[in-house]
Amino acid sequence: MGRRTDQQLNDNEDQLMSADTSMEETGDRQLDVAVEVGDGWTRRLTITIPPGRVGRARAAERKRLGKRVRIKGFRRGKIPVDVLEQRYGDFLDEHVRSVLVEDAYREAVDETELRPAGAAQITNVQYAPGERLTFQAEFEIMPSVTLDRVGGFKVERELAPVTDAEVQQILDGIRSEHAAWNAVERSPVDGERVSVAIEPLPDPDSEPTGEARPYQFVLGSGEALENVENAIKRLAPGETGSFAVAFSTEGEAEGGEETRQLHIQLDSVEEQMLPELDDALAAAAGDFEKVAALEEAIRTDLARHHKEEAEGRVRGKLMEALIDANAFAVPQALVDRYLDEMIQAPEGADPEKVREARQELAPLSEARIKEQLILDHLAKREGFQASDADVREEIERLAESRGVSTAELRRRLAREGSLEAVGRNLAVEKVFEYLKRESGVE
């Protein structure tokens, strides 16, 4: 048989592309998929793409390439096939292999109705032009949750009473917020506000350059290091000094320190003048006519806060009991993804410290994932889905509590991608009400 002409090769490509298009339109994927069950939630797919599909994909890609590239001596779109193969054969093989593997993996997952919990590991790719393409994809699937026990747990609601000390602490905070600050001409003490300018120096003999940074803070509030505050306390307003200050060394063993030279200028010292706890302060704090009304509002808020805390503890205990009574494993892929979101290490972070942090937080991550899986499972099993009316009513309630219009809040939630979370939160509330009934929690 004589050698085929370039025109015959191009005609064959057109036929292949036409056949490939027809196949896609009819939905004939022509994949051979074998599923192997591994340890836990691991699944391994062996996927085989027949030679015909491989050939059609390669011919289509070669024709597209021929319309894009320029080769000296040939018009674009009229480059002979053998020239394209000589120049771009390796590129075509690599590109077609990559595209076919990606597409076939996605189709195989749809065909097997598996739900991957994370990215797949692609291995054992066997490919040669004109032959079938075979590869393996290994991944973990989303776990199937089975709850044999959802009630009868011994969980008590522990509601803490509102104490006078709590009320007094909030009243003291209100007095502090409305306090006046009066300048004094002496060295400062804890609880007083200072204005300072601080400049690091290379060594004790260096002179300040005038590039000090200004700071203002209350001594003893934790805003500045204790050693820096101790140096400031040795100055009076208008005085300056150079101090050797010890700093903890990050990354060293516990107790590691280094000394830095700081030039400090104390500009002013102010003492706090607390107002009387009277009806005038009550009016300024929240438009209350009497101090008694302010205290009553504080007690009401604290009682609501204690009730919410007690509810949170009840829910935590119920989830712990559910997890203990219904053991199941969590795919490592879910744990890794959860940890990635929790620990967003900056570029250049110590890999060992990041590894230690992930190891330390792994149990907490696993517990949180189990809780989410259980809540979603129960919401689906018991039909606790929020209706459109429920979501609409909840958005109206949230809008009123935040002092915005319903339309504005809906737009804000949509922009933040939080609109669906409203319905899920309502479903979760129904799940917990169900769980509390099953264990008789009042």
Image (spheres, helix red, strand yellow):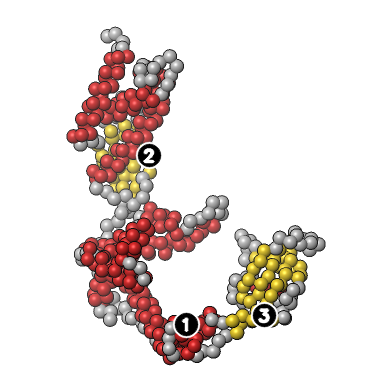
Name the N-terminal-most of marks 1 and 2. Answer: 2
Q: Is residue 86 above or below residue 152?
A: above
Q: Residue at x 27, y 9 (%)?
A: 1
The one of 232 and 133 positioned closer to us in this rendering: 232
Location of residue 64 in the rendering, given as x and y in whole percent from the top left corner: 34, 26
Query: Mark 2 belongs to which amino acid?
Result: Thr
Q: Residue at x 31, y 40 (%)?
A: 105
- Specify the farthest residue to the left: 26
Image mark for residue 183: 3
CA–CA distance in space, label 3 to label 2: 73 Å
| Disc 3 + disc 2, Cβ < 8 Å | no
The residue identified by callout 1 is 285
The residue identified by callout 2 is 123
- Tell me if mark 3 has few (under 14), some (14-19) or many (20+) residues whose alpha carbon lies within 10 angstroms of its own: some
Location of residue 63 in the rendering, given as x and y in whole percent from the top left corner: 33, 24
The one of 173 and 52 positioned closer to us in this rendering: 173
Query: Mark 3 belongs to which amino acid?
Result: Ala
Front of the two marks 1 and 2: 1
Relative to 183, 174 lies left or right: left
Q: Is residue 221 above or below residue 119?
A: below
The quarter of the displayed image where residue 148 is located: bottom left
